[in-house]
């Protein structure tokens, strides 16, 4: 039988497969609302006990997520060998890890800032919805005969 995605169909992914894919990536895009306007920030993250943790410094992101603000996180990937791409979206509430035990646990996570500036605050996203899809990537060179 041929490739089930060759016709351009999109496959909806179950939650466990979404989490498995999220674990394979290192970078995501965090969408938050800042002063009534959508903003997107790239972040590196780790998965911890069914939630997503990233580090930040005081500033725009931390101000916007105060009081468990709703956020969305998108993680994408491409399997060039299989000719497929995937996209997972996690929606939930984000909050700075404030309790001493939570900070102590977060410090042990394999999570290190990519930027040279200090990122002393750990932020945890508690998911309320996880969804994803996989689809065939069109090989334009093959289709155009190039």
Image (tube, rainbow, N blue to C red):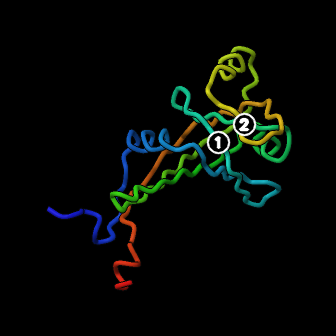
60, above or below 99, in the image: below
Contact between labelled residues 1 and 2, with CB atoms less than 8 Å apart = yes
Crowd tier of the residue under label 1, counting other residues whose Cα lies within 10 Å: few below 14, some 14–19, many 20 or above: some
Question: Which residue is pictured at 63% across the width and 52% down the height?
Answer: 29
Residue picked out by circle 2: 113
Residue picked out by circle 1: 44
Question: Which residue is pictured at 67% across the width and 45% down the height?
Answer: 43
User: Callout 2: helix, strand or loop?
Assistant: loop
- Residue 4 picture location, percent across and down: 24, 62
User: Callout 1: helix, strand or loop?
Assistant: strand
Pick the quarter of the image with the N terminus: bottom left
Sequence-wise, the earlier of marks 2 and 1 is 1
Pick the quarter of the image with the C terminus: bottom left
Quarter location, residue 36: bottom right
- Residue 25 picture location, percent across and down: 52, 44
Question: Residue furthest toward the right?
Answer: 59
């Amino acid at each position: 039988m041929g490739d089930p995605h060759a016709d351009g169909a999109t496959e909806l992914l179950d939650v466990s497969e979404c989490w498995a894919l999220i674990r394979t990536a290192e970078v995501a895009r965090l969408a938050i609302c800042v002063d009534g306007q959508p903003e997107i920030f790239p972040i590196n993250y780790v998965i911890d006990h069914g939630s997503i943790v990233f580090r930040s410094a005081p500033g725009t992101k931390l101000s916007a997520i105060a009081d468990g603000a709703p956020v969305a996180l998108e993680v994408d990937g491409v399997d060039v060998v299989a000719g497929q791409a995937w996209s997972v979206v996690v929606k939930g509430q984000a909050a700075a890890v404030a309790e001493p035990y939570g900070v102590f646990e977060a410090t042990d996570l394999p999570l290190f800032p990519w930027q040279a500036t200090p990122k002393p605050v750990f932020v945890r996203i508690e998911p309320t919805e996880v969804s994803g899809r996989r689809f065939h990537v069109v090989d334009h060179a093959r289709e155009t005969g190039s």
